[in-house]
Image (cartoon, rainbow, N blue to C red):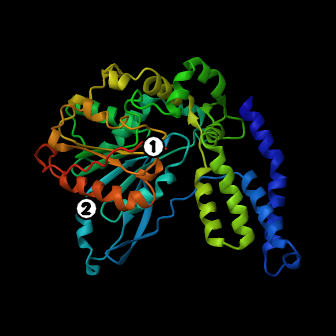
Amino acid sequence: MLYHLHELWRASLAPYVYWAEASAKMYAAQDSWLAALPGAHRMAAGFELLYRLGKDYEKPAFGIHQIEVEGVPVPVVERVALEKPFCQLLRFKRYHDQADGLARMKDDPTVLVVAPLSGHHATLLRDTVRTLLADHKVYITDWTDARMVPAAQGPFTLDDYIGYVQDFIRHIGTDDLHVISVCQPTVPVLAAVSLMAARGEPVPRSLTMMGGPIDTRQSPTAVNNLATRQLLWWFEHNLIHTVPAHYPGAGRRVYPGFLQHLGFVAMNPERHLMSHWDFYQNLVKGDLEDAQAHRRFYDEYNAVLDMPAEYYLDTIRIVFQEHLLPRGLWDVAGERVDPAKIRNSALLTIEGALDDISGQGQTRAAHALCTGIPEANRQHLTVEGAGHYGIFSGRRWRTQVYPQVRAFIAAHRGTATAAPAATTTQSKPTRKR
């Protein structure tokens, strides 16, 4: 019922949103007589703020059409490499002419970026992908909004997520494949590769795990505490709702994106309030560059998707409440998940010293589980001054984290057990503030 009430509220709000958008343009357009009125800038700013507070935010595009490599522009084309009901495997194909001196790009290692299915779209990793493209062939998992998947496709569980990851790895091939998992997928990726190793299947050359909840008993955060404060039935009865009739996934049980978005905002409401106030002030002052930066950030931040109910509840129970992976008690389709079976993949874990979503030690816990990987092929990096998003996006990602990731992948392009060890770089943890 809550989902239906939300849709009714959105529909009733739509006329006012359109009116606010039109009014903002009328008071801001140079050829409009309204723009010449006293206080027109304030009126335009106020109407645009109302419009952005009330509008629907659709999934943004990756928009990566070109990168620069060694000062040379290289075109990039996005295409679907493999499509499944709940996810598309995207490939970002670089096109270059051997005459441009970049023929070596044909021999670059391949990277599979496993994006989180935790509310935001995979486009949140746009900066991650763009940076990786300079030195790698890049694939990424682009998870589908559950409300757009017909109910006839059946449920989607955490076990299914693991199966998808395995299928993507097999499709790409493991000859020179390096998997990077960001946040939530560190758990299913570790499980997927563990099961493949136990069966004797080829595995990726390296695993890079960034800010993920491998063992949430370590330095629990507000996110972890929320998941453990209530019993599983509370989440099912209060947060799971049915997709309304006008969507392709009508009748599917989901954890709605709008509830997840409310949770995001509730973690730091003062910061979001001040950000919108600064946006209004920048519009009034004519600081269009800062105003556009605000638009770009919230176009991404406010775009959310619905998660399948089965997958969401599995994650709450297995990862946050029962800690089955670090306790060695996790069975997937009758097979025990044992990370110690991984021997031929190198392991890099990355944490932000100020991460308030996955606390320090939660990702690093993978090392205690992956005892089959030689110590020389395991590395950990703690990034000073970085929060959760800073380890995979923004200046710190590009200048501090990515050089380490690039070097780690380059060092383990051969068989992991025979590859030279990468130099361990670990900054001293700082107290959260």
Q: Outermost residue, left direction?
A: 418
Mark seen at residue 149? none
Give the image quarter of residue 92: bottom left
- The residue that appears at 16% across and 39% down in the rendered structure is 375
Q: CA distance from mark 2 to mark 1?
A: 31 Å
**Mark before the other along the chain sequence, 2 or 1:** 2
Q: Quadrant of residue 300?
A: bottom right
Q: Is residue 355 above or below residue 235?
A: below
Circle 1 crowding by C-alpha within 10 Å: few under 14, some 14–19, many from 20:
many
| Amino acid type of the residue tagged 2 in the rendering | Asp
Residue behind mark 2: 108
Residue 405 % position (x, y): 29, 54
Q: Residue at x 46, y 26 (%)?
A: 320
Q: Nearer the viewer, residue 113 or 250?
A: 113
User: Quarter holding the N terminus?
Assistant: top right
> Relative to the observer, which residue lies in front, 248 or 243?
243
SS of the residue under disc 1: loop
**Mark count:** 2
- Residue 324 spot, x, y in % from top left: 38, 22
User: Is 281 on the left or on the right of 296, as rendered?
Assistant: right
Inspect this view and state whether residue 199 appears: no
Side of 81 relative to 33 (left or right): left
- Which of the numbered marks, if any, corresponds to residue 355? 1
Vertical position of residue 1 compared to residue 186: above or below? above
* Amino acid under disc 1: Asp
Name the secondary structure under disc 2. loop
Q: Is residue 328 above or below residue 135?
A: above
Q: Residues within 10 Å of mark 2 (few under 14, many from 20)?
A: some
Q: Is residue 89 above or below residue 281?
A: above
